[in-house]
Amino acid sequence: MDAAVSAASAEAVESVRPLLAVVVALAAAAAILLLHGRDNLRDAVTLCASVVMFLIVASMAPVVLAGGTIEYNMFQILPGADFAFRVDALGMVFASVSSFLWMAAAVYSIGYMRSLEEHAQTRFFACFAVSLAAAVGGAFAANLFTLVIFYEALSLVTYPLVYHHENEESWHGSRTYLVYLAGASKTALLAALALTYYLAGSFDFVPGGLLNGVTASPLLLSVVYLCYLAGFAKAAIMPLHAWLPSAMVAPTPVSALLHAVAVVKMGVFCVLRVIFNVFGVDLMETLSLGIATAYVVSFTIITASIYALTRDDLKARLAYSTVSQLSYIILGAAMLSPAAIVGGIVHIAGHALSKITLFFCAGSIYCASRRKKISQLAGIGHKLPWTMAAFFIGSLGMIGVPPSGGFISKWYLVLGAVEAHELVFLVVLLVSTVLNAAYFLPVTYTAFFKKESAARDRAEGEPKEIREIPMVAIPLVVTALLSLLMGLYPGYFLTLARGVVG
């Protein structure tokens, strides 16, 4: 092994690269605003910034894979409350997914926005870039203070994206989004932060848990934990999930950003930080918080799947699927067994690749045909074969069929349920998998095997000729293939997940 990497595995490496990954996206947003009216240059900046951010993130992977960390401390607000970055295995999973998928989302968004001649494209791409800056900043946050800053920034900067169409429907959807994510849940989050600082005198993430070993009653610690779950509402645990379907009024690239790349992943990432680095596995087990959380998210998994099954609007079905799939990640962490934790963390990547493919496909269908409902898709697979084939592959990842990436994460979740001697969660995983198949496979069946009715009502604005749009179709084919490759070569994410387990 290289001597430098070996040394890095033994101690933290100080480097400005975590900050640079954030600054690149922020600089891109500023450049995009300055290039208003110069569309080609603006789009070139978006693409270049996404590549540069990914390369910066990738450059830190060898140190983390070797067991090391990368740190950069900017300034101190209070003792134990620094604005600082720390790159570890869990953060690298989130950052790798976010930065890589920004490249695919950038190409897709350019094709989508231009094909529909959307308004306010400069604002759209600028907010998109800042959203990725916030996501990667949160991934590399060294403590709760820094994490919450980026968490809140992400809520605010994605609001204009949800409100993009500026109509009555967008107003209602964006209002619900803002009330949940920047309003009601903040009381609980601030209470959790205040109590944590009071008990521990610090916001730092600790491998065994910041609160593990503090002198406090079990009731108080349980209240702190519940406040964190309520405060990090982006995780969309029922009943704090309504914002997510409401946000479907946004353009499809925004839906892909919300559901696969940044927003919801930030929510579950924050919950995982609380479980692993604020409370710690031992304290979670002592307080029986892990098993309680597992039951709550199991309810979310099943109920959201049933909701998805009843939705005819394609994006709404995908939205409720996201509510369900996010809880797989938390379920893995909450079962507290090593295999389950690995499965939950790997599902961050598996879900991201499959779900962004599915939303890309929904957008491709809309761009080509203006159709939104599953009942309108009869025969469309013969007109959009690449799109619907990619949708099928993405569906396999959500169901957990090998060789998709979703199979790897669900396999470890099943092993983890057995390892934890909690067979009820094994039943939850099996039932939800059947429900996944029940609401995803009919979409592909309708598209390829049902004949289009001559009496079907045409979608508003539906063109006479329905065909693939290359700049929209190419990214979704790439992400579909990558979801399969992850299932065949899962080593990168498995190594990082095992690094979290220790």
Image: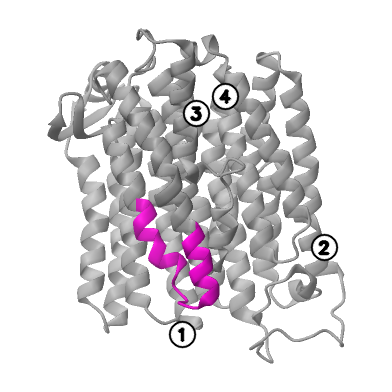
* Residue 394 location (% of width, % of height): 65, 53
Q: Nearer the viewer, residue 250 or 476?
A: 250
The three-letter amino acid code for the residue at tag 2 is Tyr
**Residue bearing the label numbered 1:** 117
Q: Quadrant of residue 16?
A: top left
How far is disc 1 from disc 3 in space, using C-alphas? 45 Å
Which secondary structure, mark 2? helix
Pinpoint residue 272: horizontal percent, then vertical percent: 46, 30
SS at mark 3 in the image: helix
Magenta segment, which residues?
154-176
Location of mark 2 (residue): 445
Instruction: Determine the CA span between mark 3 and mark 2.
Output: 42 Å
Whole-angstrom CA distance, mark 2 to mark 1, is 31 Å
Q: Residue at x 62, y 42 (%)?
A: 238
- Could you give the CA–CA distance between mark 3 and mark 4, rounded to whole angstroms? 13 Å
Depth check, mark 3 against mark 2: the one in front is 3
The answer to which of marks 2 and 1 sits earlier in the sequence is 1
* Along the line of sight, the residue nearer the viewer: 109 or 423: 423
Count residues near mark 3 (Cα–Cα under 10 Å), then give few for <14, some for 14-19, many for 20+. some
User: What residue would you read off at disc 3?
Assistant: 226
**Circle nearer the N terminus (3, 4):** 3
Judging by the rendered image, the residue that carries numbered circle 4 is: 334
